[in-house]
Amino acid sequence: MGDTSVDHSVDMLIVGAGPAGLFGAYYAGFRGMSVALMDSLPEPGGQVTAMYPEKVIYDVAGFPAVRGRELVNALVEQVAPFNPTYLLDQQAAEIEHEPDAVLVTSAQGLKVRAKVIVITGGLGTFTPRPLPTGIEHLGRGLVYFVPRLDDYRGLDVVVVGGGDSAFDWALALEPLAKSVTVVHRRDKFRAHQHTVDRVHASSCEVLTFTEVATISGDERIEKVELVHSKTGERQVREAQAVVAALGFTADLGPLTRWGLNIDKRHIVVDTTMYTGVERIFAAGDITEYPGKVRLIATGFGEVATAVNNAAPVIDPTAKVFPGHSSDDGTV
Ligand SMILES: Cc1cc2nc3c(=O)[nH]c(=O)nc-3n(C[C@H](O)[C@H](O)[C@H](O)COP(=O)(O)OP(=O)(O)OC[C@H]3O[C@@H](n4cnc5c(N)ncnc54)[C@H](O)[C@@H]3O)c2cc1C
């Protein structure tokens, strides 16, 4: 680390460990930069991990069909040889400009000094819509999204919500959980009809006009009390896990105070992905320019542009063009 006044000192700090950020970290590593990835979520993968890890994606170059979770795993594997520092559960909050670097402090108090920042913050910081009850069980059986399906093997799981995430989780958990109960406070679902039909055809139980009244258990969740919103009838179920899939709100939050040119919740960049603020580049869903298309494929291209254009800012003797990765192998 070398510098004791900060927690980490790196060539490049990437803010946002979604698909664009992960691929950017690969490029930074390939260019010999030390790199840290900061994300306010507890897992890498951005929107893909948080909202649709079980969906199949068809428009990522080279993958005719890839499950969201598999794409994120592959991105993590691709960057692994370069040992990026993952700073998860850390929201990039404050920024200070120094003569040759930028100092970022997270909302949790972590300090990172970087020669360049690439913001791949997507929609901004995700905040899950909370369950009205049982918040004290967060991390003890109550989750907002499911990073590792395998942790749910043999459990009784209650999934709360009526949207795509709730129904996708139910379908993904059904083969390995002991039981899956979907609880929704209405009888209409926002999820695709096809997914709803598949859940109805599975062993999942779907309870409509039902809400979670209380969650109980000492170390971990043991029971969930459900209440019918029309009849007031209550029932207590054995459950060791509750997945609250009520959606997320997203907000650029602290990034709006970094002096960036923000246009309708996006950061305006030039063709090099430079934001106009010294040492700060951006890429992926968060950027704005004429003709912008918000897709994983575009984010990959943009972040390669951002990282390679940042290289001469870190080392004035470096070229923008990185050379070909295929020249690097031994085969
Ligand atoms: C349901 C759904 C289906 C989709 N299907 C497809 C598809 O089939 N094909 C396709 O190409 N695209 C699809 N997309 C869009 C695709 O997911 C996005 O284009 C992609 O995730 C953008 O990647 P990103 O890395 O730019 O940003 P994100 O994936 O949004 O990642 C940004 C990350 O930055 C973090 N972050 C933000 N602000 C901060 C901060 N201040 N500090 C720390 N961390 C921060 C966030 O927590 C997040 O993890 C879909 C989107 C959804 C919601």
Image (cartoon, rainbow, N blue to C red):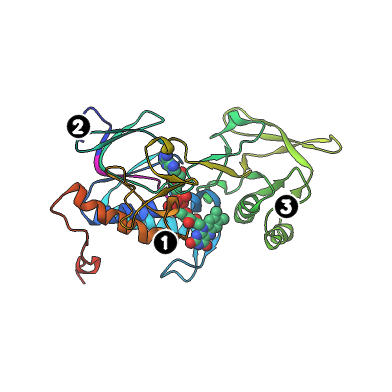
Verify CB contact (< 8 Å) between mark 3 and mark 2: no
Res. 318 in view: yes
Q: Gap between marks 2 and 1, in whole Å?
A: 36 Å
Q: Label 3's element? A: loop
For label 2, the crowd category at 10 Å Cα-Cα, with few meaning under 14, some 14 to 19 and many 20 or more, is few
Q: Quadrant of residue 23?
A: bottom left
The residue at label 1 has a CB less than 8 Å from ligand 1: yes
- Kind of residue at disc 1: Thr
Chain-order first, disc 3 or disc 2: 2
Dot 2: element: loop
Q: Main SS type for the magenta part?
A: strand
Which of the labelled discs sits on residue 189, or is there none? 3
Give the left or right position of residue 67, taking residue 6 as reference: right
Q: Secondary structure at mark 1?
A: helix
* Part of the protein shown in magenta: 10-19
Q: Nearer the viewer, residue 96 or 183?
A: 96
Q: Position of residue 326 (x, y in %)?
A: 24, 69
The disc label shown at residue 298, or none: 1
Q: Disc 1 or 3, which lies upstream in sequence?
A: 3
Task: Let me know if residue 56 is in the magenta part.
Answer: no
Query: Mark 2 — residue?
Result: 3
Pair 1/3: label in front: 1
* Left or right: 302 in relation to 191: left
Residue 14 lies in the magenta stretch: yes
Q: Tell me the kind of residue under disc 3.
A: Phe
* Residue in the picture at 60% in, 31% down: 135
Classify residue 138 as left or right of residue 292. right
**Front residue (pair 234, 178):** 234
Kindly identify the amino acid type of the residue bearing the numbered disc 2.
Answer: Asp
